[in-house]
Amino acid sequence: MRMKDYFDPLPVAPNGDKKAKCSACGQVYVTNASSGTSNLRRQIPKCFDIDGPGPAKKQRRAPLDQAMYREMLAISIIKHNYPFRYVEHEETRKLHKFLHGDVKFITRNTAKADALKIYEREKMIIKDKLEKVTGRICLTSDLWSSITTDGFMALTAHYVDENWNLRKKVLNFRVIPPPHSGSILAEHLINFLADCGIEKNFFTITLDNAKYNDILVDRLKGHLRLNNALVCDGDFTHVRCSAHVLNLIVQAGLKAIEGAIEKVRELVKYVRASAARKYKFAECIQILSLQCGKHVRQDIVTRWNSTYLMLDCALAYRRAYTRLALVDSVFKTSLSEEEWARVEIITRLLKPFYEITTLFSGSSYPTSNLYFHHVWRIQLYIEEEMCNADQVISDMAKDMKEKFDKYWKNYSMILSFTVILDPQYKVKLVEYCFSKLNMTFEEREMKLKCIVDGMHKLYDTEYNIQSKTMHDSLIHESSNVGGNTLDEMDGFDTFQSQFKVADNEKSQLTLYLEEQNIDRKVELDVLQYWKENQVRYPKLAIMARDTLSIPITTVASESSFSIRGRVLSKYRTSLLSSNVEALICTRDWLFDLKDENENEMDEDLVEDIEAMIPTFGNF
């Protein structure tokens, strides 16, 4: 590096000092022999892009936008769950200095302040967006206990925006001091609604089946009723989380077959216990040519879906486990053919529950219109298995039916409306589904009437108010026609014509139901259908938009708990609860991303045994 390539010499000063000027920025430096050149060398990367060796002078680099640098640094902390002290890490600072010499380092407190500024800014943006939502806003809420045992309440909003896209936004994630009773939680929830300014737009809230949530909903409805913000007097306010109900149903059935499941669990534990056993099992897989791309999975007892995956993978390697019992004298936990056959039946029985739970858990597409059809599938499936020749499976199905009847004997009315608002199905699907279940004709008719009447009630009281008022006015006016004439029949023609108008003025809901169904073989986006038909059915389209935004599970609030667990991990237990809320909410508002490490826990329970096979060579 030659100094003359970057600095222009100046005339000697009167006091004898030699000086040089930076040819890029004009900064003047003393260049006496006693002064050294370190100050000159530090200046070069500030004003020039150095690209490899050579004397060529480079173009002056653009000055650093320090404000933008700090903003991007704060956003990286928010998105990737970095600790605030990340900005003080020695190598991080070296990297940033290398990229731009003008960078001014910040402390962890400055980084925290920057992140909180972004939170406050985005909070105002979200609040403004929610205030402009023209439709109803639905909520999901759940409680989470941190590693510090603090109880956090998560609240998530769901709505359809002006472009008919389904949106979800985390509204808050706040510490709730104990006790967590229904009345106390309701008080916090009511305050949250007021803070967000969405009380008047509130429609439904989806909660799990904890007892305190019934009290919470009662208190919430009482508050909304006083403020004239309760839809249909609260008939449809409370939506029970379908994923939680499914979990209760399946767990009830698993108790009847826990013996067979425990044996499979022991098989998996044995294989995963040491590297030697894994290699021996991999050898069995290769000899039997069982490579199927599946992994050896260990389940989590409290998560039945992980139990299903464990059983499904175990069946794929059934013959390998049998061979392992022959070649490994220590391996004592083996299943008989009869037990494997039962595991196969159990897995087949659990498969539709797993698929439906996965389908219900979506948050990027409407799920309320999926509810009726799939809950019916579950009921039908359970009733069929109750007649299974295998007494164990039959008992399992009976236990599941008992739990099903406790929560779903009467299907959720508001969620049943949405299948009728699917133009491929309408009321005919409800009639068909009920006809396949084990119920009398009178029971079917009563259930169908209850759903249809409830749908008309919602439409008439909340969406067809103007038409209803016009119709009532017409009837009132017609009752006075002809009253002042001598001939009693003089006003009959006018009277009759006005009633014909009233009779022929069918509601949009009635016209829609009478219209021919769309072929169900045609791929259809329900939200897109109502967007395209809002001119034909303007009021009914609004009702469809609102009901299709109802989430049928609390997964949207639950799914980001893993993110929150990483924000408030064992390494960050001193993080203030207000900072936790700021980081969690801002990440959701800016990126709407799932946790990049959400499957980390599952990965600890999965072994890719087949990946070990190539290390053996040929046998």
Image (tube, grey):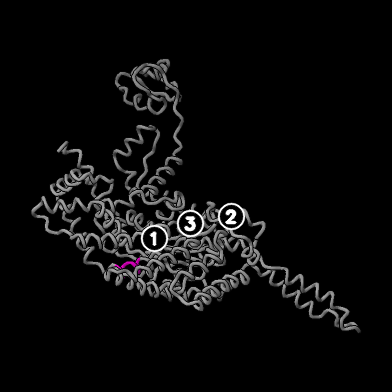
Question: Taken as a whole, is the magenta stretch helix, strand or loop?
Answer: helix
* Amino acid residing under circle 3: Lys
Given the image, on which type of amino acid does mark 2 rest? Tyr
At horizontal 37% and vertical 43% (from top left) the residue drawn is 106
CA neighbours of label 1 inside 10 A, class few (<14), some (14 to 19), many (20+): some
Q: Which mark is residue 357?
A: 1
Residue at 35%, 21% in the rendered image: 52
Label 3: how many Cα within 10 Å (few below 14, some 14–19, many 20+): many
Q: Secondary structure at mark 2?
A: helix
User: Quick check: is 405 in the magenta stretch?
Assistant: no
Q: Closer to the camera, 402 or 20?
A: 402
Task: Give the residue number, with chain letter if any, for mark 3.
Answer: 168
Residue at horizontal 39 percent and vertical 36 percent from the top: 103
For residue 391, which numbered disc appears in the image? none
- Horizontal relation, residue 325 to residue 181: left or right: left
Give the secondary structure at mark 1.
Answer: helix
Residue 224 shows in the view = no
CA gap between label 2 and label 3 equals 21 Å
